C-alpha cells in the first residue's frame, strides 16, 4: 500500500476518527495521540510499535513497523522517507530532528495520551476502512506495550 491508497481508504472515517481522538484525548495523531493511534493501528494490521528518536535517543513519535515500512496516521513509507516526512511536517521550529527509530521501551513518550477504550474504538474504525488483506487475525497479535 502507498500513501495515496492509504488516504483513499481513510477518507470515509477521517472525521469520525479525529472527532473521537480529539474529543477524548484533546490531541491529534501528532501532538500527543501518536501512541494511541499506533496501538489502534497495530491491533488491526499487526507489526511492532516503534518510536522515532532524536540523536540523544529521546523518543518523539510512535509508529508501527510492518513489512519494512513505518506506518502512522499519515500512511506507510519506507523508514528513510518516513523520517523525512516526519521531520518536514512535524518538527518545524525545533532544533532537533528524528534521525532513526527503535522498539518502544517503558518510559518512552511519557506525556502521550493512552486510553484502552479509545484504542478499541479507533481500531474498529481502521478495521472498517482498510482492506482485509492488511488485517491480521486477532489471535495473531503480540500483547501491546503499555
Image (tube, rainbow, N blue to C red):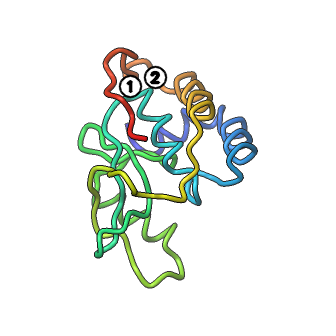
Against 24, residue 13 (above or below) is above
* Residue nearest the viewer, comparing 1 with 55: 55
Toward which corner of the image does residue 93 lie, by quadrant?
Answer: bottom right
Tell me how many marks there are. Answer: 2
**31 vs 129, nearest the viewer:** 31
Query: In the structure shown, which secondary structural element does the residue marked by tag 1 occupy?
Result: helix
Say which element carries label 2.
loop
Residue 76: x and y in percent read 39, 45
- Give the labeled residue for mark 2: 131
* Residue beneath the point at 49% across and 81% down: 94
Disc number at residue 134?
1
Q: Is residue 9 above or below residue 95?
A: above
Residue at 39% in and 34% down: 144
Picture quadrant where residue 46 is located: top left
Quadrant of the rendered image containing residue 65: top left
Task: Compare residues 50 and 105 and report the one nearer the observer.
Answer: 105
Left or right of residue 51, residue 109 in this image? right
Q: Are marks 2 and 1 in contact (CB under 8 Å)?
A: yes
Image-based side of 29 in relation to 140, left or right: right
Identity of the residue furthest to the front in this view: 107
Amino acid at each position: 500500500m502507498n500513501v495515496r491508497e492509504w488516504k483513499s481508504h481513510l477518507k470515509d472515517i477521517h472525521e469520525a476518527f479525529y472527532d473521537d481522538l480529539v474529543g477524548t484525548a484533546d490531541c491529534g495523531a501528532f501532538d500527543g495521540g501518536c501512541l494511541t493511534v499506533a496501538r489502534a493501528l497495530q491491533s488491526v494490521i499487526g507489526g511492532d510499535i516503534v518510536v522515532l528518536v532524536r540523536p540523544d535517543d529521546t523518543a518523539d513519535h510512535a509508529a508501527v513497523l510492518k513489512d519494512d515500512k513505518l506506518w502512522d496516521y499519515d500512511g506507510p513509507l519506507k523508514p528513510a522517507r518516513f523520517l523525512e516526512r516526519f521531520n518536514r511536517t512535524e518538527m518545524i521550529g525545533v532544533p532537533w530532528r528524528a534521525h532513526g527509530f527503535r522498539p518502544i521501551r517503558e518510559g518512552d513518550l511519557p506525556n502521550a495520551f493512552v486510553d484502552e477504550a479509545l484504542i478499541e474504538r479507533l481500531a474498529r474504525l481502521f478495521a472498517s476502512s482498510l482492506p482485509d488483506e492488511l488485517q491480521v487475525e486477532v489471535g495473531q497479535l503480540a500483547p501491546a506495550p503499555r
